[in-house]
Image (cartoon, helix red, strand yellow):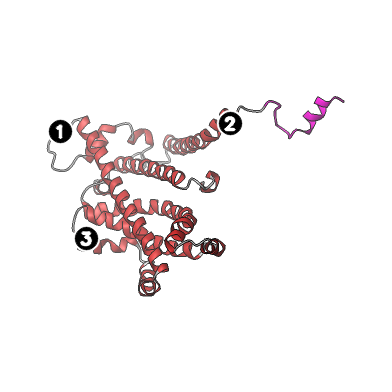
Amino acid sequence: MGLGTSINKCRAPGQSGAGAPPHRAAWGGKAQPLLWGIASLACFIAIWEVAWVAGWADPLLLPPPHIFLRHFVSQAQYFVPTDVIGETSGATAFRSLIMTIVATTLRVLVGLSLGFVCAVGMGVAIRYYRVFGNLTLPTITLLAPISPIAWLPVAIFLFGIGNGPAVFMVFISLFFVMTVSTISQIDSVSRTHLNVAAVMGATRAQTFRHVIIPAILPSLFLTLRMNLFGAWMVVLIAEATGVGSGLGQVVMLSRNTFNASLSFFTMTLIGVTGFVFDYALRVVQRKVLFWVPENSMRT
C-alpha cells in the first residue's frame, strides 16, 4: 500500500483532495443564507398560489400574490394624500408610496434611537447613583409591564395629532425593556474584569468606557433587535389612530373599504421594509461590535 493511498484513506468522508478555493468557500458561506431565504419565500408563495388554484382561498378575501402585486399603480394610488383631487398619475402614486414608507421608517428610527440612548443612560445612572436608582427603579419596574398600546391615549393627550404620538409609542415600547436589560447586564459584568481595571488604576469613567460598555453592548443590541418588530407593530397602530398618515393609515383604509388586495399589498411593504431595517441593524451591529465573533451574533 502506497503512501498516497494511506493519506486518502485517512481523510474525512466527503473531503476532496484539493479542497475548494478560499474565496469560493467564503462566497458560498455568504450566499447560503440568501439562497435559503429565497427558497423559504418561494415555498410560502407557492403554497398560497396552490391554495388559490385549488379553490381553497377566496380571491376576494385572500388574494394570492400575483393578484395584489399585479396592479401596482392602482394599489399605489391609495397612498396619495387625501387632499389630492382628481386622477393621479403613476409617477405621483409611486412618489406618494415611497414618501409613506419613508415617513413610517423615520418614525420607527427616531423612536428607537431615542429609546435606546435614554434607556442605556437611565440604566447606567440607576446603577452608578444609588439614591437616584432607589427613587426611579421601582417606578420603572411598575410601568414596564404596561402594554405600549395602552399608552396611545396618553400620547395623543401629550402630543396631539401628528408625528409625536407615533414616535412616543415607539420610544415607550423600547425604553422600559431596554432600561431593565441595561441594569441586568451591568449587574452581570464579570467581577474579575472590574477588579483588574481597579488594580490597573482605572477611573470610574475609564472602567465604564473600556469594561462595562463593551461587556453589555452585545446583549443590548440583541434586545434592540428583538424589540424592533414590536416597534413596527406599535407605530402602525399609532399611525392608524393618532397620526393620519403612514403605512398604518393605509392598513386602516383597506379595512374600512374592505379592500383585501390593498391590505395584503401594504402588509407586503411592511414586511419588506421591516426586513431591510433589521438587516441594516445587523450591519451596524457587526460594525460596532467588531470584537465579537460573527457566528455568535447570528440569530
Determine the residue positioned at 37% across, 75% down. 131
Percent of width and height locating residue 67 = 34, 34
In this rendering, the label closer to the viewer, 1 or 2: 2
Q: Amino acid at mark 1?
A: Glu
Percent of width and height locating residue 283 = 43, 42
Q: Which residues are magenta?
A: 1-18
Q: Nearer the viewer, residue 75 or 247?
A: 247
**Circle 2: is it few (<14), some (14-19), or many (20+) Cα within 10 Å?**
few
In the rendered view, would you say 221 is above or below 20? below
- Mark-to-mark CA distance, 3 and 2: 54 Å
260 lies left or right of 56: left
Residue that carries the numbered disc 2 in the rendered image: 25
Residue that carries the numbered disc 1 in the rendered image: 87
Residue that carries the numbered disc 3 in the rendered image: 156
Percent of width and height locating residue 238 = 27, 55
Q: Is residue 254 visible?
A: no
